[in-house]
Amino acid sequence: KAFEPFAPLIDRGLIELEAGGSLREGKRAWLLGKYKADAVEVVPGDTILPYFVMYTSHDGSLRMGYQNT
């Protein structure tokens, strides 16, 4: 339920979840997702794949958010 706001992105095929886990005895949770987009070539031969991380806590110590990586 915590990551439900991102379900439409998954359902529409815009992102793909790659990993997930919890920290601090399950109090904090995270998901790693990959945008289904082409890699960006920063300089010739050096590409960046578009990923992001979503995170939240179950004890109120951290707000839900996400960050592009």
Image: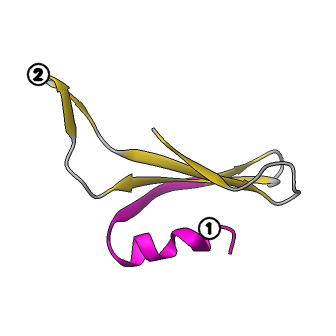
Residue found 60% across the figure and 74% down from its top:
4
Q: Given the image, on which type of amino acid does mark 2 rest?
A: Pro
Q: Label 2 crowding class (10 Å Cα cut-off): few <14, some 14-19, many 20+? A: few
Q: Which residue is mark 2?
A: 44
On screen, residue 52 above or below 8? above
Judged left or right of residue 69, residue 49 is left
Residue drawn 45% across the image and 54% down it: 33
Q: Residue at x 69, y 56 (%)?
A: 64
Q: In the shown orientation, is residue 63 left or right of residue 16?
A: right
Q: Quadrant of residue 9?
A: bottom left
Whether pointer 1 and pointer 2 mark residues with C-beta atoms closer than 8 Å, the reply is no
Residue assigned mark 1: 3
Residue at mark 1 to residue at mark 2: CA–CA distance = 36 Å
| Quadrant that contains the N terminus | bottom right
Instruction: Tell me where residue 8 appears, x and y as whole percent.
Output: 45, 76
Residue 43, how many percent across, how many down? Answer: 16, 21
Magenta-drawn segment: 1-20
Tell me what residue is drawn at x 87 percent, y 56 percent.
60
Give how far across and how far down residue 40 sits, in percent: 21, 37
